[in-house]
Image (cartoon, grey):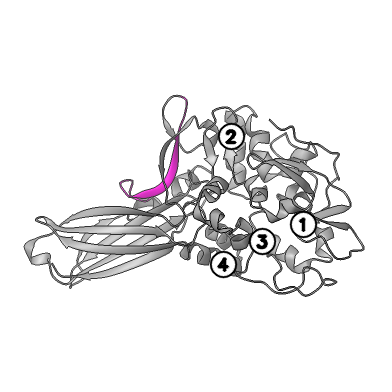
Amino acid sequence: MVKINQFEGGAFDHPDNCAACHQEIHDAWSKSKHRYAWEDPFYQPDYLLASRETEGFTDIFCGECHAPVAVRTQQLPPPDGSLFDATAKKGVSCDYCHTVKEVVEPVNVKTISDPGRIKRGPRGEGESPYHEMMFSKVHTESAFCGACHNVVHPTSGAVVIDTFADWEEGPYAKEGTRCQDCHMTPGPGVEKNPGKSSFMGSERDHVPTHFFPGGSVFFQQREGNEREMELAKEMLQAAAELETEAHATQEGMELVVKVKNVGAGHKIPTGVTYIRKMWLEVTVTNGQGKVLHTSGQVKESNHVDPDTIFYHKVFRDEEGNLTPKSWLAEEIAYDRRIPAKGHDVQSFSIALDENETTDLQVTVRLLYRSMSQEAADQLGIDGIKVPEIEMARSELSVTL
């Protein structure tokens, strides 16, 4: 196990120091999930619960990703953040990332930091009155992202988060498409963001964006960040496509649905998939609009029908019980997700009366929640109603 190199409080620069020269980059980062890695109101209750249930075992294990400056300056534990200075509260901030000099292994934040006047990045040229610049090969590689986006339980070995490993083992890595190529661009896919990285800098054909878009629509909506919410929605909707076919059977109809991962360089969903939900909703109506079949519907109290086809991961604890709590994970009990450029096929047998076999309308939707309603209910925050995002839709007119 790599020992975290530690420093005195104040060793890392506050992000506001960076904003003076890098205003656009700072503005994008300030609305990102990196900025709110620690102060996310959804994360905090879960983190404190884990600390209580493990008697502090998860304080550093989770804090390494969500409050790396606090861990490296020994301001964590205690888990309540009462020792944090202003910089530590800013989550994954500018100076943490740009003072990493080595990724020992892309898992569980096995990185070596070197805070100080030298700032490391993917270029290294230019001049600044505030700091020196150094080219860092580490910052051009996906392993830099993998240090946080690959998490393995330190005692059981259960794979908690495997976004980097998915990418590394998949087709995008073989093609040379890095994490940064999709998540540090203006929109879904590999795009360019021409401009300057600072007001003193040179014009470039691409300046990496620092919003790091993912599927965090609900979080951005709660924060009132409309533009960022739409970008997150675009990322989700670019990830998947649906194909549907219908065939007559003796009982009525068989509906075959293919869910295709066409735009994500890793499995969908990814990240904390044990509290996320992606699922298929199926609705069949006749020519008069009468509903003949439903599946995957949102039921009472905003919960999804438990018999739905879900795409996510579930753990098993040491007693063999299913659990969404990653800190109790002994092994993976269930993992249905769709790999990059892969697909999943589901069949639905739908019983129909003989007089209900014409003018049928089939609607299939792939829906997503970045946090399940069950997980939201456990946070103790009043009024959380998690919305679903439509990632893909397929409509089919059928006459049997």
In terms of secondary structure, where does tag 4 sit? helix
Q: Nearer the viewer, residue 58 or 134?
A: 134
Determine the CA span between mark 2 and mark 4.
Answer: 31 Å
Q: Position of residue 358 (x, y in %)?
A: 13, 70
Q: Nearer the viewer, residue 27 or 175?
A: 175
Q: Which mark is residue 50?
A: 2
What stretch of residues is rendered in magenta? 304-318
Determine the CA span between mark 1 and mark 4.
Answer: 25 Å
Q: Name the kind of residue labelled 4 in the image.
A: Leu
In this rendering, is residue 291 above or below 152? below
Left-right relation of 81 to 16 = left
Q: Earlier in the sequence, mark 3 or mark 1?
A: 3
The question of residue 4 being in magenta is answered with no
Q: Quadrant location of residue 102?
A: top right
Residue identified by numbered label 4: 231
Which of the two marks, 1 or 4, is nearer to us in this view?
Answer: 1
In this rendering, is residue 400 above or below 351? below
Residue identified by numbered label 1: 121
Left-right relation of 340 to 285 = right
In this rendering, is residue 292 above or below 89? below
